[in-house]
Amino acid sequence: MKSTEKRKTDKAFKQDLSNEKGRHPGGPFIIQMLFKESVPMPDKAEMTAVMKKHMGAVECFCHDEKTAGFAALEHIAEFKDGKAPVQLMVMGASRFEGEGFDAFTMSQMWDCMEDRERIFRECRYQVVAVDMLAAALPALERANLDADFLDALAELYPDCEAFYFPNCGKLFPAEYVRSHQIKGPDRFIRFGVNVRFFNIEGTEDKLIDTLGMDTLFLPDLQYHFHGMDPNWVVNHAYNVASYLLVNDNPVESGETVDGIEKGQMSRRVQWKCQYEEALVQPPREVLDINMGEYASGGR
């Protein structure tokens, strides 16, 4: 998977790792759909048909104006005391307060930089959707199911203006979500994983990391470097994240991944990996990639 997003930010933010609780790996995957006007819950038969089209056999176990719930019968979560199908929940429309987003989070909304403030100003309602019991699924299966769920929601809510993903902090115009041509697990990487970019104030150093991989119990990535085009590193991060998802994270501390040569991933360049505490909030363990001659800081 490749990305060509351009990264540039001049805002100064302070490192804040004071929240010791940090993240909760494996938590629900949350989808917030934003609207200018309130919308009704779609018809039960329509919802069931669209869910079935995107994710196979489903069973609607509740449906009213406040909540709709679907059991994804082809995705079974296994627990010590039994098995149960994953549940997909859609809440009724509620008020949305766009001013609740801090400047730090908004600075990393790379897919909606020009429209983010307008979207938050104009959208006064939201519909929230979540998966439940999905943490028990293998990472790849959950990633594909959550992406199927997203595709179904995009079809069911044609009046949606934008999609926000709290797990990773990404914001997308709804039309992009409806019209994307991405296939397979890279859909989750595109919408559920954010590659963030920071300049280290007072230095030439830069930091790029990912946010959102821990939803699948996979490690987020971190690069602390100088002297290389950040967009090359952004592409590298998306490709490594995709590799970790498809291969269920085979990388251990001390092992290497292909590095970058002339803007492209190359086997001739090997970068060493090790697990460390994140340099930028939220507090969590990340897979730090030492970029060799381009690396900054001590390892």
Image (cartoon, rainbow, N blue to C red):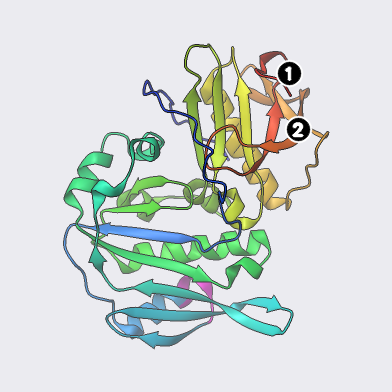
Where does the N terminus fall, quadrant-wise? top right
Q: State the image coordinates of residue 272 (x, y, percent, origin top left).
A: 78, 28
Where does the C terminus fall, quadrant-wise? top right
220 relative position to 72: left or right: right
Query: Residue placed at 37% from the left, 52% from the top?
Result: 164
Task: Write down the residue under mark 2.
Answer: 273
Quarter of the view holding residue 37: bottom left
Eyeballing the image, is 276 above or below 8? below
Q: State the image coordinates of residue 128 (x, y, percent, origin top left).
A: 36, 65
> Magenta stretch containing residue 246, yes or no?
no
Between 112 and 21, the residue placed more toward the observer is 21
51 relative position to 65: left or right: right
Query: Residue placed at 38% from the left, 73% from the top?
Result: 90
Q: Amino acid at mark 1?
A: Gly
Eyeballing the image, is 222 above or below 245? above
Callout 2: helix, strand or loop?
A: strand
